[in-house]
Image (spheres, helix red, strand yellow):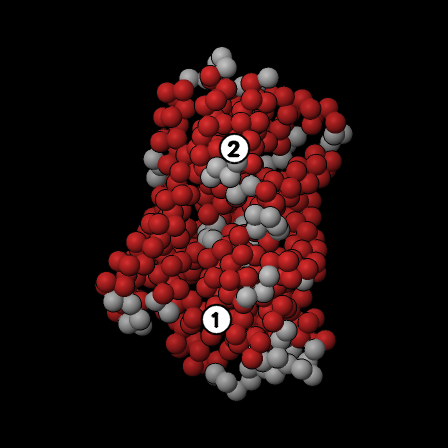
Amino acid sequence: MYPAIALISFFALLLLTVPVAIALGFGAIIPAWFGAPVNTAQTVRTIVTAIDSFPFLAVPLFMMAGDLMTQGGLARRLFSFADASIGRLNGGLAIATVFACLLFGAISGSSPATVAAIGAMAIPLLTKQGYDLRFATVLVTSAGTLGVIVPPSIPMIIYGMSANVSVSALFIGGVLPALVIGSLLMGYAFWYGTKNKDMITTSAGQVSYLKALRESVWALLAPVIVLGGIYTGVFTPTEAAAIAVAYSAFVSVFVFRELTPRGVVKTVAGTALTIAPILILAGTGAAIGRTLNLLGVPDMLGALIGGAVSGPLMLLLVVNAMLLVVGMVMETIAAIIVLTPILLPLMTGFDIDPIHFGMIMTVNLAIGFITPPVGANLYIASGLTGLSVVKIVQGLLVPLILLLIGLAIITYVPQLTLWLPSVIGG
C-alpha cells in the first residue's frame, strides 16, 4: 500500500502541474503521513546530502564549461574544424554536424546544450547549402543525444553516484558506444546527402583544412585534456570538470578574446540559474528513491520481473522497454536517481555488469531527449528553427530507428562497453 501512496502522490501532483522536483519531494514524504516506516527528518537530510557530494560537483562544472565554450567561440571553431575535415563528402556538412556534436558533447556532457550550441551554427549553414530545413532540424535534434552518450556525460555522473560505481570507468566504457551511435547517424547523413546530391552544394574550398585546424587547435585541446586526464588517472572527473571551466574561460578571454572577464561572470551566472532546478531535482529524486527502497519496492519489482523473465536476455528486453517509456515522460536525472536503486539489484542478480547497465540506461534516457512529450531537444530545436514539435517528430523515424539499433547493439554486445574499462582500468 505504501509504495502505491508514494507513486500516486507523485503522479497526482504532476497532473496538477506541480514541478517535477516538488512532486518527487512530496512523493517521498507523504507515505510517512499514513504510517509508513519512513523518517521524515532523514528524508529531508537525504535531499541535502544527495547534492552535498564531491562527484556531483562535476555536473554544474561541465555545464558551465559547455556554456563558456559556446559563448567564448570554442564551439564555433569545433564546428568549423568538423566541416573542413568532412565537408567535401556527399552530405559532408551534415556528417560534420554529427561529428561536431560528438566533439562538443566530449566537453559539455549535456544533450540540450549540444543541440543549442551546434544547432545555432549548423542549421543555417545546412539550409544555405540546400538541405531541407526539417532534415537539418531532425539531424541536430537526434545528434544532440550524443551529448550525453559520449563521455564526459552528466547522466553517467548521476548514475555513478546512484549505483556507487566508478564514474571514470563509465566514461571509458562510453567511448565505443558513442562511436557506434555517431557512426549510425553519420551514415544517415551520408545517405541523405548522396540521395539529394543534385540539390546540395558542398563545403569544398570554403575553408582549408589546415587553416581550420590552426584556428581550432585550442578548442580541440579541451576534450583531449579533459578525457586524457580522466583516462590516464591524472585527475578525477570532478577535477577534470573544474579544469574544463578554467581552460574554457582562459581561452575565451585571453586567446580568442571573445569574452571579457565580465562576460565570464555573466555566463557563470546564467549557468547557476540553469543548474539550480537540477540540484533540487537531484535532491528530491534521491529522497523518493530512498523512500521506495525502504518500502521494499526493489524486492517487489525483482520478484515480479524475475518471475516473468526466463533469463538475462529477456530481462534486458523488458527493462529497455520500460526505460524507453520512462524517458518519454520523466526528466533524465530524476529517472536515474529514482530507478537505479530499484533496477540495479535486479540486473546484478542476473550477472549484468553495473557499468554495462549504466550505459544501457544512459542510451535509453538519451533517446528520451527526442521523444515527446518531455523531449527537451525537440523544444530547443523548435525554438531555433520555428518548426513545430509535431513536424520535427514526424521526421524523426529514421534517426529513432538508428538509435534503437545502436541501443540493441550496446545491450546485447556487453564487451562494446566493458572492453575498454578492462584494458585501461577505471
The quadrant holding residue 69 is bottom left
User: At numbered mark 2, what does the secondary structure look like: helix, strand or loop?
Assistant: helix
Q: Nearer the viewer, residue 269 or 203?
A: 269
Picture residue at 54% right of the left edge, 67% below the top? 385
Residue 405 shows in this picture: yes
User: At numbered mark 1, what does the secondary structure look like: helix, strand or loop?
Assistant: helix
Picture residue at 58% right of the left edge, 80% below the top? 129
Amino acid at dot 2? Leu
- Neighbor class of circle 1 (other Cα within 10 Å; few <14, some 14-19, many 20+) is some
- Residue 197: which disc? none
Q: Nearer the viewer, residue 129 or 414?
A: 129
Residue 161 shows in this picture: no
Q: Number of numbered discs present?
A: 2
Q: Is residue 323 above or below residue 231?
A: above
Please name the residue that numbered disc 1 is placed on: 121
Please name the residue that numbered disc 2 is placed on: 13
Picture residue at 48% right of the left edge, 83% below the top? 207
